Image (cartoon, grey):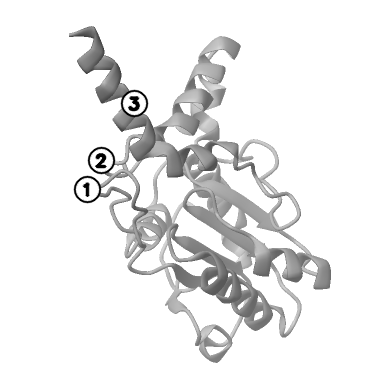
């Protein structure tokens, strides 16, 4: 019985071995910058929150596979949306929750460490579909230079990721989309990436990615 158990454990270890490398992946600060600070005014779910949640999950895929050595493909690996700068606080609060920071706020230090370990180890459970409350990686970029663009083109997402570009300069959005598409071609489409622009851009600027416009999204509680 013991021998059979050891053999089964060895087979399982070999099967998940390709996933073990992913445990070494870290947040890429060359490509991304995390959302900083707690939301200044988080009034809970609103019309824009629901629309953003639907948008990030659409085409994200389940994240699960039948075989442990396979990696799932996101049906829509990159999507772009635009929201008005007046919704900055609402978007900040949404991104904060999507990244799971609020989970850390309500836990003790030990509970927060346990939560982080669980998030890190979850990809080993290849058969579990992604939950709606599973934390995403996040980024809030206020400046995008050539160095950042180069890093984005080489970046390999370790988990689903929301990138907010706050009030980008003219012509930056197409460059960011091109860099992200280059990374997808290089590293595969295993994780969904969602690019949210705070500012006014033309649909043509985001033509190379699935596009949504939230500038007319009603939100009566926005300040």
Q: Circle 2: is it few (<14), some (14-19), or many (20+) Cα within 10 Å?
A: some
- Name the residue that disc number 3 marks: 10
SS at circle 2:
loop
Judge whether 19 appears above or below 46 on screen: above
The residues tagged by marks 1 and 2 sit, at their Cα atoms, a distance apart of 6 Å
Q: Residue drawn 53% across and 48% down? A: 158
The residues tagged by marks 3 and 1 sit, at their Cα atoms, a distance apart of 19 Å
**The N terminus lies in which quarter of the figure?**
top left
Judge whether 24 appears above or below 113 on screen: below
Which mark identifies residue 212? none
The residues tagged by marks 3 and 2 sit, at their Cα atoms, a distance apart of 18 Å
- Name the residue that disc number 2 marks: 127
Q: Residue drawn 44% across and 65% down? A: 189
**Hey, which residue is sitting farthest bottom in the picture?**
204
Q: Quadrant of residue 182?
A: bottom right
> Whole-percent x and y of residue 40?
64, 40
Judge whether 128 appears above or below 63 on screen: above
């Amino acid at each position: 019985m013991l021998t059979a158990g050891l053999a089964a454990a060895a087979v399982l270890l070999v099967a998940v071995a390709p996933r073990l490398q992913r445990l070494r992946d870290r947040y890429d600060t060359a490509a991304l910058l995390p959302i900083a600070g707690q939301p200044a005014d988080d009034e809970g779910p609103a019309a824009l929150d629901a629309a953003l949640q639907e948008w990030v999950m659409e085409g994200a895929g389940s994240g699960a596979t039948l075989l442990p050595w396979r990696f799932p493909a996101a049906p829509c690996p990159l999507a772009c949306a635009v929201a008005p700068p007046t919704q900055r606080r609402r978007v900040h609060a949404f991104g904060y929750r999507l990244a799971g920071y609020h989970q850390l706020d309500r836990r003790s230090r030990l509970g927060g460490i346990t939560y982080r370990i669980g998030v890190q180890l979850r990809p080993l459970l290849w058969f579990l579909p992604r939950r709606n409350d599973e934390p995403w990686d996040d980024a809030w970029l206020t400046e995008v230079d050539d160095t950042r663009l180069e890093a984005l083109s080489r970046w390999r997402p370790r988990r689903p990721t929301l990138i907010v570009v706050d009030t980008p300069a003219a012509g930056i959005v197409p460059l960011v989309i091109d860099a992200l598409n280059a990374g997808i071609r290089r590293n595969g489409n295993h994780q969904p990436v969602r690019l949210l622009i705070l500012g006014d851009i033309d649909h043509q600027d985001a033509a190379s990615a699935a596009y949504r416009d939230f500038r007319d999204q009603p939100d009566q509680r926005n300040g």
